[in-house]
Amino acid sequence: MKTFDAAATRAALTFERLVPALREAFAGDATVPPRHVHSIGEGAGRGTVLIMPAWSDAGYLGIKTINIFPGNSARGLPGLHATYVLYDAQTGVPLAQMDGNEITAHRTAAAAALGASFLARDDAANLLVLGTGRVAKLLPAAHASVRPIREVHVWNHRPEGARALAAEWRSDGWNAHAVADQPDALALAVRAADIVSCATLATAPLVRGEWLTPGTHLDLIGSFTPAMKEADPACFGHGARVFVDTDEALLKAGDLLDAIAAGALAATDVQATLAQLCRGEREGRTSGGERTVFKAVGTALEDLTAATLVWRDADGQRLA
């Protein structure tokens, strides 16, 4: 059984490889049972444990265990920790343990980019990121693999975090800026963006529908439980075309559940899943002026795809 640390896991997961691999995986067949969700603790220290299995005809079985503790930010710790174990699906033999944090962060950002490849305008160049965690840090590179991103802005509920991430991105060559710590600054940034990508653990809406302009693509990839939400119900109404990663989003995403309860969205209004888009069964963006929303809660299929890339890369079996 091999062990892949964070650096070795990360090295195999370039977005130029991972996004096409996800497109192929969503268009294909795999078995993805419902995730197990367990709550740990109470109050500010409350956490969530997810257990996510999947297996495919390619002969691999994977199980991810992921611990989410939002209160860790006050401790100076990441809010998410994960491990991933890959097995031979025909024998059950363990093949490798991989850094689940890198698997999760890269596959989440790559799924956002895959959604944007169908839903963002072809000329989308201005990206606004909400959040400064592991996933948020990867979003410029992920979206730039499918769209001509030239300018990036970042907002965080802790302004110093946004300033630090913007500086980090600038050192990597991005034209990056932190959203000002002023009233209405976030609203103005949302109105100016072509893609608004939210990767937070928020439990109250951050983006308001009234701020979104025609042609905007709203990408919601942070919340994954009914108690979590990043956008208000108006984001899903007023002619917006709404897409999800899987049908599970309609059961788990607080953003969608709130919008349905408010009458801004019906389950039947959802235009397509990623699988339907990747198989060509449904259409993505149809005009430059329409407003699109992509809501993702994550799926073990993405984890298995990323882990398979890491394993094959180490084995010298690069995917096409």
Image: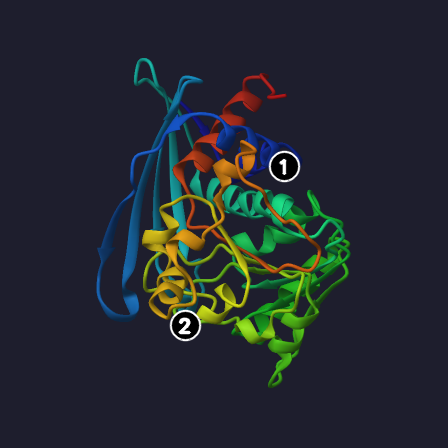
- Looking at the picture, how far across and down is residue 237, in whole percent? 49, 66
What is the quadrant of residue 194 in the picture?
Answer: bottom right
Residue depicted at 53% across the width and 34% down the height: 281
Residue depicted at 63% across the width and 21% down the height: 320
Q: Is residue 85 left or right of residue 46?
A: right
Viewer can see residue 266? yes
Residue furthest out toward the bottom: 183
What is the quadrant of residue 7 in the picture?
Answer: top right
Residue linked to disc 1? 14
Dot 1 falls on a residue whose secondary structure is loop
Mark 1 or 2, which is nearer the eye? Answer: 2
* 300 up-or-down from 175: above or below: above
* 129 up-or-down from 280: above or below: below
- Looking at the picture, how far across and down is residue 172, in whole percent? 73, 53
State yes or no: discs 1 and 2 in contact (Cβ < 8 Å): no
Q: Residues within 10 Å of mark 1 (few under 14, many from 20)?
A: some
Dot 2 falls on a residue whose secondary structure is loop
**Depth order, front residue of 245/309:** 245
- Looking at the picture, how far across and down is residue 155, in whole percent? 59, 70
- The amino acid type, in three-letter code, at marker 2 is Ala
Residue linked to disc 2? 204
